[in-house]
Image (spheres, rainbow, N blue to C red):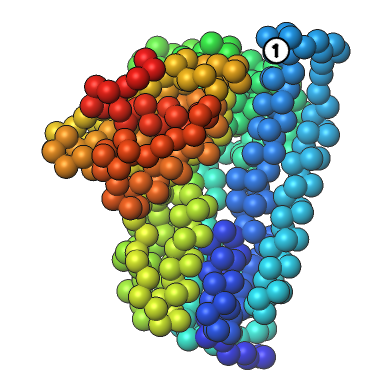
Amino acid sequence: MASQTFDMVVVGAGPGGYVAAIRGAQLGLTVCVVEREHLGGICLNWGCIPTKALLRSAEVFHLMQRAGEFGLTAEGLGFDLDRVVARSRGIAKQLNQGVGHLLKKNGVTVVMGEARLEGPRRVVVGDRVLEAGAVVLATGARARDLPGLEADGKRVWSYRHALQPPHMPKRLLVIGSGAIGIEFASFYNALGAEVTVVEVMDRILPAEDAEIAAFARKQFVKQGMTVLEGATVTALDRQAGEVVASVDKSGDKSRLAVDAVISAVGIVGNVEGLGLEELGVRVEKTHVVTDRHCRTGVDGLYAIGDLAGAPWLAHKASHEGVMVAELIAGGDPHPVAPDSIAGCTYCQPQVASVGLTEAEAKAAGHEIRVGRFPFIGNGKAIALGEAEGMVKTIFDAKTGALLGAHMVGAEVTELIQGYVIGRQLETTEEDLMQTVFPHPTLSEMMHESVLDAWGRAIHF
């Protein structure tokens, strides 16, 4: 078997793996990245990027339908689903090629194939042996299948099928109301499907602040979605032209006929076939257990991104990739702080958050101050025709520390980074109050929400 030696071998070229490889190369390490399918991983090819392309098409279509509100006239509105999907796939392909270019530019060796560990520093890919000073596992995760609800690509879809649908459903059932489920629900609803969302928890968007989730729910229902919380899909009867779902909501059982079902009930880590058991790597609930610096406990072996557990976010994986590369290169990087990583859901309206929810802050024993500011009080939001939304900030009443920030409304996935920086810099309410925000902008609502926590809001 042919053998090569590198300072660092990365298994998986998703947003964690390829970023780790590039950062390692920048630091002077010899780096090899192994990928079994697509450079860029799920995020770039089947997740973050193509879904945002679809959602952008839906957003523009929705805006076209509102042309009259802006004094405009638009006639004969419609959409071509094949072209919408083709645009999404084209963008994914473009960025996939871009990752390949970046790896080549930085001198990273790319090996395509399935990887298996034959030691903490020895990776086998087919007939090639890759010896390494350190190995970084970045194999990511895949959609979870529940018994009886497995995706078949015909009438029952995973996120991959939903990105390239075999048909446009008139009636759609979405199982699960996390980011993936709600984003697809939002996309298909905007294109005219009758969408029903079923969530087993007592509220949708269960990871978000309860007040924000409730606001978002009202908007979804206003847009025509049916939302069933505290409900379970117990069976799917797959028929020739439809699927009949058995739904149990607190003992109230019903049957729902739809054209398609999207199963979005979480993810499982890609831990199989790597040889982790033989090395004694600890795996819990399909995810590799690591310390704050992504070390597995096996010398020279690291795990990052979705493989290493929550939060399951591409930007978390990328930052961990940089951290691990710097650690391997002899640096002393700060560990990633999960509670300072923003979560974003690109539905309509968008939802974004960072830090503790109000309930979490109280449960942690904080005496808190909470500020809120509605989009209807912001001139830019009204001018944009996007007056539905809210910014909520949570502070420690004694220290003024920013504990959490939660938003729902237009472009909040762009706005949230201001609070992320605030968290990273250990900003207090005084710092934010003294910051001058430009006018007219949506960001002014961030300022007003902080002011409101101390009873000083000006414009509401």
Rendering coords of residue 80 (x, y %): 83, 27
What percent of the width, then of the height, locates residue 337?
A: 34, 55
Q: Where 276 falls versus 165 (above or below)? A: below
- Name the spot of residue 245 as percent of width and height, x first: 55, 21
**Quadrant in the picture for the N terminus:** bottom right
Q: Where 326 sits versus 197, above or below?
A: below
Label 1 is placed on what type of residue?
Phe
Taking 443 as reference, is 348 left or right? right
Q: Position of residue 316 (x, y in %)?
A: 46, 55
Which residue is rendered at x = 71% and y = 74% of the image? 104
Helix, strand or loop for disc 1? helix
Residue 201 appears anywhere in the view: no
**Label 1 CA crowd tier, 10 Å (few <14, some 14–19, many 20+):** few
Q: Which residue is at 44% across, 75% downward?
A: 326
Of the 4 image quadrants, the one containing the C terminus is top left
Q: Relative to the observer, which residue lies in front, 276 or 407?
A: 407
Q: Nearer the viewer, residue 201 or 440?
A: 440
**Residue under pointer 1:** 70
State the residue at coordinates (65%, 84%): 128
- Side of 49 relative to 355 (left or right): right
- In the picture shown, does residue 53 fall above or below 297? above
Judge by depth and name the residue closer to the eye, 326 or 360. 326
The part of the image, by quadrant, that contains residue 283 is bottom left
* Residue at 23% over, 27% down: 454
- Residue extending furthest right? 76
Left or right: 13 in relation to 307: right
